[in-house]
Image: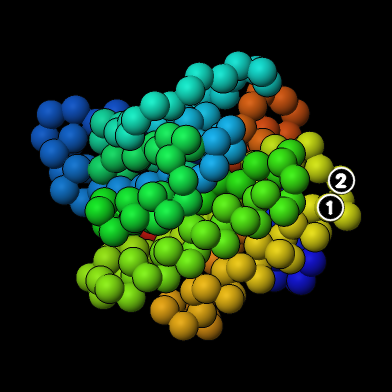
Amino acid sequence: MSARDKAASDISEVPAVRHGRPKGLARLRTYATGKEILVLGPSSAGKSKFAEYLQFGRLHPEGEREMTYGLTKSPTFTLTLGVDGRLALNVRRTVDTPGQTGPVQHAGLVGERKPHAVVVMVDCSKPIAATIHWLDLFCDRLDTVLRKGHHIRNKLREIVVVLNKRDKIDPDAFEELTARVRGVLDRHLTVVLGPERTAAIPLLECICVQGPRGPALIDNVLACLAERLTQ
């Protein structure tokens, strides 16, 4: 794993995260200035659990799972980070996608939804070859989507790859996975996004269930999103 990816996967000192639902005029202002976050990835990667935590700050015990059969859109909400609330992210909506649809269709949703941020969830417990195959198809199609629509590319502020179920993979396999994920990103997105922007795509480890490491890791992902989307 490169120093860049080690830094991205380390747990930093994450500030407190508060989740809120504005009302009345505050809700309209939040909606007008808020960002749309599109959560993508293969089946069982933890997309719905991540989207729920993003909105409510709630994690469930391991083993609980509900299937997502269609696009699920959240209402407007806010994330406030830090004891003094120094960093606030207005979220117009999150869009959770069903994993049963394939990677090509998921990439097509980027063109249809035109989000400000894309979160790609990866399941570390699955065979690496299967994960890379999904990501390869997704990024290949995403390259086409972004080439055809410069307005889509310009609106898309951030792409974040979340390596979920980090506790289900040993260090050597995790190093191989991150290296191969980085290779797919570089191969497919360097031309359309540019080498600097592609290299800056973070690979963040995560555990989207209750446990000793879950909250710290997922809050690190939220802090990364908030910092990048409010720059």
For the point 79% across and 53% down, the residue is 174
Q: Looking at the picture, does residue 66 appear above or below residue 120?
A: above
Mark-to-mark CA distance, 2 and 1: 5 Å
Specify the quadrant that holds the N terminus: bottom right
Q: Looking at the picture, does residue 25 appear above or below residue 36?
A: above
Q: Nearer the viewer, residue 153 or 61?
A: 153
For the point 72% across and 53% down, the residue is 129
Specify the quadrant that holds the C terminus: bottom left
Residue 31 drawn at (x, y percent): 19, 43
Q: Residues within 10 Å of mark 2 (few under 14, many from 20)?
A: few
Residue contact between numbered discs 2 and 1, judged by CB atoms under 8 Å:
yes
Residue 219 appears anywhere in the view: no
SS for tag 2? Answer: loop
For this view, does 174 lie left or right of residue 9?
Answer: right
The numbered dot on residue 173 is 1
* Residue 94 placement: quadrant: top left
Residue 63 drawn at (x, y percent): 66, 18
The numbered dot on residue 45 is none
For the point 31% across and 43% down, the residue is 91
Residue 29 drawn at (x, y percent): 16, 44
For the point 71% across and 41% down, the residue is 126
SS for tag 1? Answer: helix
For this view, does 1 lie left or right of residue 17?
Answer: right
Q: Amino acid at mark 2?
A: Asp
Q: Looking at the picture, does residue 161 appear above or below residue 2?
A: above
Residue 160 drawn at (x, y percent): 52, 57
Residue 134 appears anywhere in the view: yes
Q: Nearer the viewer, residue 109 or 100?
A: 100
Q: Amino acid at mark 1?
A: Ala
**Residue that badge 2 annotates:** 170
Q: Residues within 10 Å of mark 1 (few under 14, many from 20)?
A: few
Q: Looking at the picture, does residue 19 appear above or below residue 221?
A: above
